[in-house]
Amino acid sequence: MNYEVKEMNSVDVQRRLLLKATGAAAGCCAMPIGSAQADDNVEGPAKGDLLVPAKGEATAPLKADDIKVGAKPVLVFPYDLKEKKPKDGSRLNKLMLVRLDPAAMTDETKARAVNGVVAYSAVCTHQGCDVTEFVSAEKVLMCFCHFSKFNPADGTVAKGPAAKSLAYVPLTEKDGLLTIAGGFSNKPGV
Ligand code: FES
């Protein structure tokens, strides 16, 4: 498989958000800073999609063992098996995979995990930056923009300013590959 992935880093996001804010100040396109609105024309994660890395050289669909306990989250896009391409037309489709000790997870979280691997939206619910870090000492995901923290073991916000939990998608395993078992739990992003 060979495909191109569009990547947007935090600086790009902040620049885009600033442009939106400038437009709002000029009376155009009023939108609060950081609003990460869903693109209705882009299909989101769906049952049966595989998961492929959002950046880097590796393009093969991921297995649970590709994700290591305590490591940085792996940023991924859903991969549409019918269309044979990643759903990378919107950054709101970007997910992160993190692997936890199943003993630390709630039953609800365990039910949507594969061998401790869970999938969350990578878009922060505060102002829409990418959530890219795992603080292993606290076992929380962290957004570097304003340091919100999210507990992947139970899906809650561990520390603001974010007030809303990250959206998640349930996972299952098919033919040894991580496979999406359903759509977002709620609207991703802000
Ligand atoms: S965008 Fe503010 S904490 Fe993530």
Image (cartoon, rainbow, N blue to C red):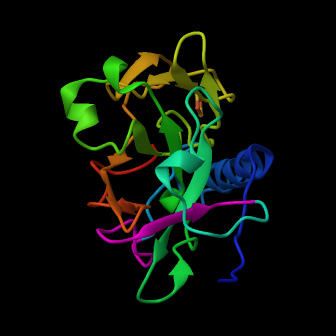
In the image, residue 65 sits, relative to residue 76, either above or below, namely above
64 within the magenta span: no
Front position in the image: 143 or 76: 76
Q: Residue at x 35, y 45 (%)?
A: 114
Span colored in magenta: 40-55
Which x, y percent locates residue 27? 60, 57
In the image, residue 23 sits, relative to residue 2, either above or below, namely above
Front position in the image: 85 or 7: 85
Q: Quadrant of ligand 1?
A: top right
**Farthest residue toward the top?**
137
Q: Tell me the quarter of the image containing the N terminus.
A: bottom right
Which x, y percent locates residue 22? 71, 51
Q: Residue at x 55, y 30 (%)?
A: 69
Any part of residue 29 in sight: no
51 within the magenta span: yes
Any part of residue 11 in sight: yes
Q: Is residue 63 toward the left or the right of residue 71 in the image?
A: left
Q: Residue at x 74, y 44 (%)?
A: 10
Q: Tell me the quarter of the image containing the C terminus.
A: top left
Front position in the image: 132 or 112: 112
Q: Is residue 173 toward the left or the right of residue 124 in the image?
A: left
Front position in the image: 89 or 120: 120
How many numbered marks have been drawn onto this rendered protein structure? 0
Q: Main secondary structure of the magenta part?
A: loop
Q: Residue at x 60, y 17 (%)?
A: 136
Which x, y percent locates residue 47? 29, 68
Which x, y percent locates residue 35? 51, 48
